[in-house]
Image (tube, rainbow, N blue to C red):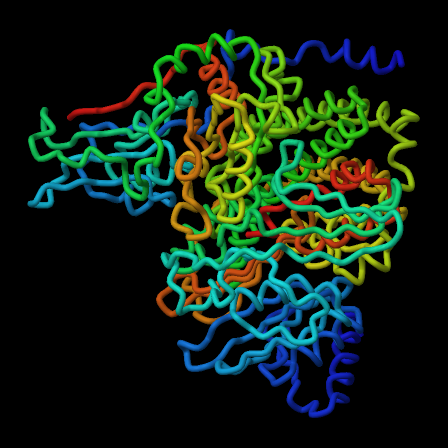
């Protein structure tokens, strides 16, 4: 019996033991997909059960079904990484008194997404440890729930009297607060950090986001599926390709037509280029934050190499306009492939010589080691993904766990570090950069001939299409639901940052205030991606 | 120690000569779209295809095409219009130095109905989806100030960057002009931590509703003459987010803008060009385009 069958058998037994367990039958909806429900209380009872048995909270997709004769529907995607399983749990809420009973006390990973779903759809949030609004700030009227279908896109946002934001009340002799932001000192996005300190130590950090909120999920609704790619590319600029790919994969998943093999290879090539540019850029950022000018200059230069390659390949330094539903928009010629392979070798040597000189410097070792430790236990509880999770010893990587072409054939082994500190996250980025260079080389050697695009067929309405991609920052999960007119009806985007921000807040506790920029850079999370 | 020295000497100088020397652009780079009025048959496919909704087709009463306007301020340079055009009238050029002091300059006009635009052209307004800015461009406020920007800031400019709802691509490109390849500090351009130390606010993003307040506070804290540079399609005209009520639809709806730098995101050279143009160290390279058939 395979690991997947064993896990399914265990879950079936546990489900049957639930009170009223016959409600929670598991039906197979795809090769690795199962669905439970729609059933009353499925969210509160079943999701914690799945998480307890090795599942990872993925995303919570609420939809407004009132115009279709229902109430609100909560779809939760739970992922089993070791077994490559994806389970969707559905629960219906009544239209008259929609209540979302929080599971955040048992599944901490759910807590931001629950707040977001509640404010966007006007659900009553019950049992939540922190039942505040998340993305809509105080100046927005309390009864404004933009993702409800009866709120037209053009409707101006009703305003309310602005209350001062609430933060945790931290008191004691010598305890003080440092408010930082929303506008930061560096050239980065806005967010508000409230440090509670005692001497030089951080007792607690509250992170308040939502400043970048642009209503992206609402803007998706009513667009032609093809036009949605342009918007997906602009969810988070540094992950332009990752988000575009997750969106296109979701459409292809709906249509049941995967991209042709050559397109899948070219997409993987672009994905690895994006990873390289960002990982190397982050190594440079870490060097800047500790005043190590040699590393900052050289990693900055190397990042330019990757961006220029991306531009030569796609016409955009951020790989925009390359991905399209069903494939990619431009191809690689034979001579370019040979030149690219020579370039990979050259850049690898260059990178190695910079990294070895950086990581052997005492100042770098002293500033990064034992700083900003994220424990494996915390990372797992809050559903931290991507390099931040792997640096804390959690072996997850979509490219291996839920592999699709060409990664299934290439066989990616996740790079893992166990210390969970800034140094571990830095080493991890180096390891992954080398892995990406090797993958690019192998993609170029195994690039199959054939078409670069097969337009996806008709999209079935009101079923979920799941796009699941290991972007450079971690797993991007995009859920697409199409209406019966063939236009986008609901798009839920879960950037890795949504899960990882709490990881940062917990990692900086008991560290020095002055080490915060370094810790922040070692996670390098997207504000735009989590604010949408 | 010697290892660092050796590596840096072996690498050599990587700083680009821009703007004094030429730069090489890859073949696939997409700059300003250009319209050939002779080939355009006025079918309107580009209007449908444009995800940023910056192309507008004005028609005569009989439905024949009169004028095509393309607002470069909100253009995301995706090339979808060029792909959609059945007549092949639109092509993507490699022009990227589009910085302009005047919002109106960025609205490209293509007159399609014969040699003269005709008397029935009252709507010379901006293209679809954009309203006139609440403040006039700064040069119309006082010619005196216009003459003195170069005098005051020609040798040194301090910038406070405010990201107001951007997707972070523009922020990364602004960061990039500080790196060793573009090295903005050789022009006396530096980024400061407080708006009180800044000569210029550099704004990216369409100004989300939540950031409008902080942006106004930063603007009020900036000393006169409060130069503002809008970088990127979102900041210039709202970009893809112009239609969302959660954004203000462009920086000039909130604070007066001195210079517009279109692009999605504008490449680092384009941002550098916009800065140097505002400092009056280089001449503008873009002027209003009005093609006639």
A395 sits left or right of A404 in the view: right
- Residue B287, given in percent of the width and then of the height, sits at 31, 19
Name the foreground residue: A523 vs A342.
A523
A469 sits left or right of A393 in the view: left
Name the foreground residue: A208 vs A461.
A208
Specify the quadrant that holds the N terminus of chain A: bottom right
The reply to whether residue A448 is in sight is: no
- Residue B55, given in percent of the width and then of the height, sits at 29, 39
Name the foreground residue: A466 vs B109.
B109
- Residue A218, given in percent of the width and then of the height, sits at 46, 58
Residue A294 position (above or below residue A178): above
- Residue A375, given in percent of the width and then of the height, sits at 87, 54
Residue at the (90%, 25%) spot, across then down: A361
Name the foreground residue: A115 vs A35.
A115
Residue at the (44%, 27%) spot, across then down: B261
Residue B58 position (above or below residue A217): above
Q: Residue furthest front?
A: A173
Residue at the (14%, 41%) spot, across then down: B59
User: Quarter-wise, where is residue A165 in the image?
Assistant: bottom right
């Amino acid at each position: 019996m395979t690991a997947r069958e064993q896990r399914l058998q265990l879950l079936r037994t546990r489900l049957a033991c639930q009170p009223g367990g016959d409600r929670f039958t598991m039906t197979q909806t795809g090769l690795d997909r199962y669905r439970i429900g729609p059933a009353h209380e499925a969210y509160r009872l079943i999701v914690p059960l799945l998480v307890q048995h090795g599942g990872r909270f993925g995303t919570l997709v609420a939809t407004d079904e009132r115009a279709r004769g229902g109430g609100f529907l909560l779809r939760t995607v739970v992922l089993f990484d070791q077994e490559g399983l994806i389970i969707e749990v559905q629960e219906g809420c009544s239209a008259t008194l929609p209540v979302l009973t929080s599971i955040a006390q048992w599944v901490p990973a759910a807590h931001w997404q629950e707040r977001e779903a509640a404010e966007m759809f006007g659900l009553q949030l019950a049992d939540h440890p922190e039942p505040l609004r998340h993305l809509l700030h105080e100046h927005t009227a309390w009864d404004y729930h933009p993702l409800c279908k009866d709120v037209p896109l053009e409707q101006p946002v009703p305003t309310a009297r602005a209350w001062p934001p609430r933060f945790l009340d931290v008191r004691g002799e010598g305890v003080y607060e440092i408010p930082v932001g929303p506008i930061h000192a560096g050239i980065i996005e806005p967010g508000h950090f409230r440090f509670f300190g005692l001497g030089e130590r951080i007792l607690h950090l509250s992170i308040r986001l939502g400043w970048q909120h642009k209503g992206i999920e609402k803007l998706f609704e009513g667009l032609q599926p093809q036009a949605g790619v342009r918007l997906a590319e602009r969810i988070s600029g540094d992950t332009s390709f990752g988000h575009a790919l997750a969106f296109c994969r979701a459409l292809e998943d709906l249509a049941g037509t995967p991209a042709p093999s050559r397109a899948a290879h070219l997409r993987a090539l672009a994905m690895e280029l994006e990873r390289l540019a960002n990982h190397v850029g982050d190594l440079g950022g870490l060097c800047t934050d500790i005043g190590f000018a040699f590393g900052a200059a050289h990693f900055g230069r190397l990042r330019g190499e990757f961006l220029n390659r991306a531009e030569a390949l796609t016409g955009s330094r951020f790989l925009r306009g390359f991905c399209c539903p069903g494939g990619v928009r431009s191809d690689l010629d034979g001579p370019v492939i040979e030149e690219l392979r020579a370039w990979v070798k050259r850049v690898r040597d260059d990178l190695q010589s910079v990294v070895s000189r950086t990581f052997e410097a005492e100042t770098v070792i002293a500033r990064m080691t034992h700083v900003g430790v994220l424990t494996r236990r915390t990372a797992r509880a809050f559903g931290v993904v991507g390099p931040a999770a792997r640096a804390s010893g959690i072996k997850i990587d979509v490219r291996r766990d839920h592999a699709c072409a060409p990664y299934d054939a290439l066989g990616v082994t996740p790079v893992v570090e166990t210390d969970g500190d800034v140094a571990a996250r830095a080493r991890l980025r180096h390891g992954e950069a080398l892995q990406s260079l090797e993958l690019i080389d192998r993609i170029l050697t195994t690039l199959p001939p054939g078409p670069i695009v097969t337009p996806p067929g008709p999209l079935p309405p009101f079923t979920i299409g799941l796009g699941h991609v290991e972007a450079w920052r971690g797993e991007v999960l995009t859920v697409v639901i199409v209406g019966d007119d063939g236009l986008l009806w609901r798009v839920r985007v879960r950037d890795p940052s949504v899960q990882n921000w709490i990881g940062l807040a917990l990692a900086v506790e008991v560290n020095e205030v002055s080490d915060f920029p370094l810790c922040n850079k070692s996670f390098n999370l997207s504000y735009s991606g989590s604010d949408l | 120690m010697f290892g660092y020295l050796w590596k840096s000497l072996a690498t050599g100088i990587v700083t680009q000569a821009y703007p004094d020397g030429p730069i090489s652009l890859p073949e696939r780079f997409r700059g300003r779209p250009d319209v050939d009025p002779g080939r355009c048959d006025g079918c309107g496919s580009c209007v449908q295809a444009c995800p940023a909704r910056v192309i507008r087709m004005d028609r005569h009463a009989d439905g024949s095409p009169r004028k095509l306007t393309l607002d470069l301020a909100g253009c995301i340079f995706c090339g979808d219009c060029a792909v959609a055009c059945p007549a092949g009238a639109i092509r993507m050029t490699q022009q990227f130095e589009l910085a302009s002091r005047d919002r109106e300059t960025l609205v490209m006009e293509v007159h399609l109905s014969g040699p003269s635009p005709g008397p029935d052209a009252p709507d010379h307004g901006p293209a679809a989806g954009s309203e006139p800015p609440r403040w006039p461009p700064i040069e119309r406020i006082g010619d005196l100030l216009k003459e003195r920007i170069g005098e005051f800031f020609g040798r040194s400019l301090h910038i406070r960057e405010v990201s107001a709802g951007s997707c972070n691509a523009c922020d990364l490109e602004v960061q990039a002009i500080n790196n060793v390849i573009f090295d903005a500090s050789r022009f006396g351009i530096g980024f400061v931590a407080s708006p009180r130390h800044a000569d210029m606010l550099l704004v990216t993003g369409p100004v989300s509703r939540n950031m409008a307040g902080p942006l106004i506070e930063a603007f009020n804290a900036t000393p006169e003459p409060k130069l503002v540079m809008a970088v990127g399609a979102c900041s210039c005209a709202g970009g893809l987010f112009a239609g969302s009520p959660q954004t203000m639809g462009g920086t000039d709806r909130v604070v007066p803008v001195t210079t517009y730098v279109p692009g999605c995101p504008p490449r680092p050279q384009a941002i550098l060009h916009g800065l140097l143009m505002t400092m009056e160290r280089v001449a503008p390279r873009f002027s209003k385009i009005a093609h006639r058939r």
